[in-house]
Image (cartoon, rainbow, N blue to C red):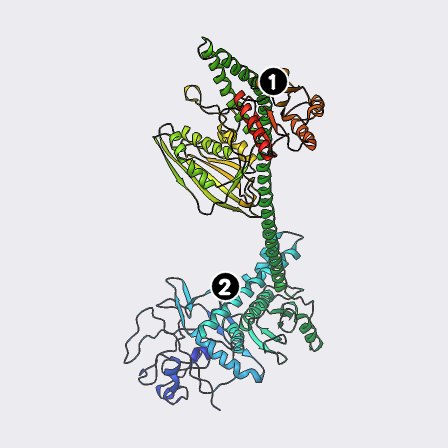
Amino acid sequence: MRRIVPACDLTGRPCVCARGSAPGSASRRTTASARDSPHQHNHDLHGCPWGVADPPKKVSETRPPRLYARSVPPPRARPEPASGRLASSRYRETAASAPSWVPRTRSRSVPGRGPPPRGTLTALRPARTIARMAPRSVSVPDPLRDIFSRAEETVAAYFAERRQEIESGTLEHSGSRYVLLRGPALSVELFDLMRDFYGEGRQREADAFSRHLLYDLAHAVGRSDARNFHARMRLGDPVERLSAGPVHFAFTGWAHVRIDARSVTEPGDAFCLIYDHDHSFEADAWLAAGRSVDEPVCIMNAGYSSGWCEASFDTPLVAAEVLCRARGDEACRFVMAPPARIEAQLARWAEGADAPPSGSVSVPDFLARKRLEEELRRKRDELEERVRERTAELEATYEALKQETQERAEAESRLMKSQRLEAIGRLAGGIAHDFNNLLTGIQGYAHLLDRELGATHPGAGHVKEIVLATERAASLTAQLLAFARRQVVEPRVLDLNGTVDSLSGLLHRIIGEEITLETELGAEVPPVRMDPGQLEQLLVNLIVNARDALPGGGHVKVATEALEVGLAEGEGELPPGRYARLVVTDDGHGMDAETRERAFEPFFTTRAGAERSGSGLGLATVHGVVRQAGGAVSLESAEGGGTRAVVSLPAADPAEDEPARPSRPPLEPAPGRGQLVLLVEDRESLRRLGREILVDAGYEVLVAGDAEEARVCFAAEQHELVAVVTDVVMPGTRGPELVEEMRRARPDLPAILVSGHVGDALEGAALPPRTAFVAKPYRPAALLRTLAALIRDAADER
């Protein structure tokens, strides 16, 4: 049968050649005997430096191969692949990161080639397989012999590529750095060190720490070495990768592996490896130290081998030492299996064991701890994810609450502002009512006095000044009433674009030559429903406000546009619907936040002294007019950044427009012709004034101080009456209610409502047919014109 002829120093067989001899042999061989040796023809294959072509003429001595370069003597190291030992002096050594003692030869001279350079290390090449024999580095059952023989060749080839340089302190195998460590330092001495560190009474705790440390370290190193070896040697088959492990174990000095025939080496849950570690460096260390133990001590052997196999099969594995020579068992025996199957495999082994263990068997909790760590990590990740989710929910809730709080604060601010303006409006309306009553008497009697004195009287000029002063005062009270929304209005469907266009000439005159006015009318702007005079008034007031913000000139823009407010949108005070928007923008000095907050308050102004040209009621009037029309007004402004006034008015349906009102009365009042008029006024001074105006105009007058007196007069003369003139706000029954009672008997009865403050009686209401409103203070001529027009229209209807 043909056999393997590996490199001389790897197999341990004698190298029969001109310069080689069996290690440890003192006999010398001749050139002829070398030439006749069956080993001779393979010299070039396994890297013997001397070859067979030109052997030296004379052999003086037999030299062992040198490990170190140049003249450095090698240590007393004894590699024993058959036993898995790597011994130096009196200590066992093991190679960290899996080194092995693979000798290098340095030739002194080679005939025909010349001597190699000093310090050169010549590597042994892997042997060419001629015939395979049983592997020497591992003991396996016969069915596995061929697999492990190939594994031995692969491992030998890996460790044949060796480089050691004493000058740089490096030892390399196949491009990887290695270090040699004493075996006892990783076993019994480490246990002693930890026991000293933990102190007396804590030996069990110290030993547990040492076991965990050694197993975890060895398991990680074994897994890492396996991956490096598999990649370097290009091993892909799981069985090939696993079979290299025990051989690698022997080459690196850990132990000689003996695999039991009961082992199942197929990947999967059924995998079970039963093996002995002959000459385990850990057991040898404890035995050499003369220390007795109760538990297995080959911890790194178990960890490294399970780590290698785990990397080979890419599945978690754990190994438990069931027998240990250090505690008196016949061998160092291990059982390796997947973590979920290890207990069952240990029980299976115990049933068929020839010699029971002398002590307890413990399964390394490495994987259990790893599972716990993974479980803790998974729980931590889940907790972190839940915390993130909960935090996101809380952040969303917080943001929603913050938004809701902000919206509530804004709503409360708007409500407070509205309530404040409402309170101011009520106060202003009440003041306006009282002032209007006073102004009515002053203005009325001034007109009567002016007519009596005539234009040539020396006091006529003074009377005219009184009249002008009362008219200016009446204008102020009218604006107060507009702010308080206490005006009687006649709403109509109006074209916003048409109103802006028709007022453009007036607006240019108001704004002056130093300011440019631009208009931009939007498309499809819906019509609005409001009093024409109020619409014109709010536009003029906004233009005047913009003009006052541009004392040195500038630019003002008036724009219109359509606006749709959806159900989910909501825009401040605007409910969902369609709106026409009027925007007046200027590039003036702007307003700060405090000024914006108070801009709609009556009599509020930022100008003082000579700069103050207005009454401070412009924006207040705009606010009242817009709110009375059902819209909203806002100011967008920043100090130094101009102002943008935005008015939003509800869109109107053109089909809802009312029939045209009667034509305006003539400019000059028509005199009464003895027609009977009922005058109802709760203030005596105004009753006398009204009676005098009507009598002076040719009317007969019935005078009543309240609703009860008016009912009596009406009952007596209802068929003779041509009209009733009544105050709106009176104690008891108010004017509109009194007129409604009278019209039950006289539906065609014309009526004039007179008031300086309509209050709730006519707030926002349209006047019924054959009804007119005259605001206090009024000129006598205005009252007479309105009365004559109503009487004439009533006569025409008959």
Residue 618 location in percent, x, y?
Answer: 48, 28
Dots 1, 2 in contact, CB < 8 A: no
The picture quadrant where one finds residue 220 is bottom right
Q: Which residue is mark 1?
A: 691
**Does residue 493 appear left or right of residue 702 in this picture?**
left
The answer to whether any part of residue 323 appears in the image is no
Q: Is residue 470 above or below residue 264?
A: above
The picture quadrant where one finds residue 763 is top right
**Does residue 166 appear left or right of residue 681 in this picture?**
left
Which quarter of the image is occupied by the C terminus? top right
Q: Is residue 121 above or below residue 1?
A: above
- Please tell me the numbered disc located at residue 487: none
Count of all numbered marks drawn on residues in the image: 2
Q: Mark 1 or mark 2: name the one nearer the start of the chain.
A: 2
Q: Secondary structure at mark 2?
A: strand
Residue 311 location in percent, x, y?
Answer: 54, 70
Q: Secondary structure at mark 1?
A: helix
Q: Amino acid at mark 1?
A: Arg
Residue 122 location in percent, x, y?
Answer: 36, 74
- Crowd rating for badge 2 (residues with CA inside 10 Å; few <14, some 14–19, many 20+): few
Give the camera-side residue of 253 and 50.
253
**Does residue 681 appear left or right of residue 503 in this picture?**
right
Q: Amino acid at mark 2?
A: Leu
Q: CA distance from mark 1 to mark 2?
A: 131 Å
Give the camera-side residue of 548 and 717.
717
The picture quadrant where one finds residue 373 is bottom right
- Please tell me the numbered disc located at residue 181: 2
Give the camera-side residue of 85 and 143.
143
The answer to whether any part of residue 361 appears in the image is yes
Give the camera-side residue of 279 and 258.
258
- Crowd rating for badge 1 (residues with CA inside 10 Å; few <14, some 14–19, many 20+): many
Residue 258 location in percent, x, y?
Answer: 58, 77
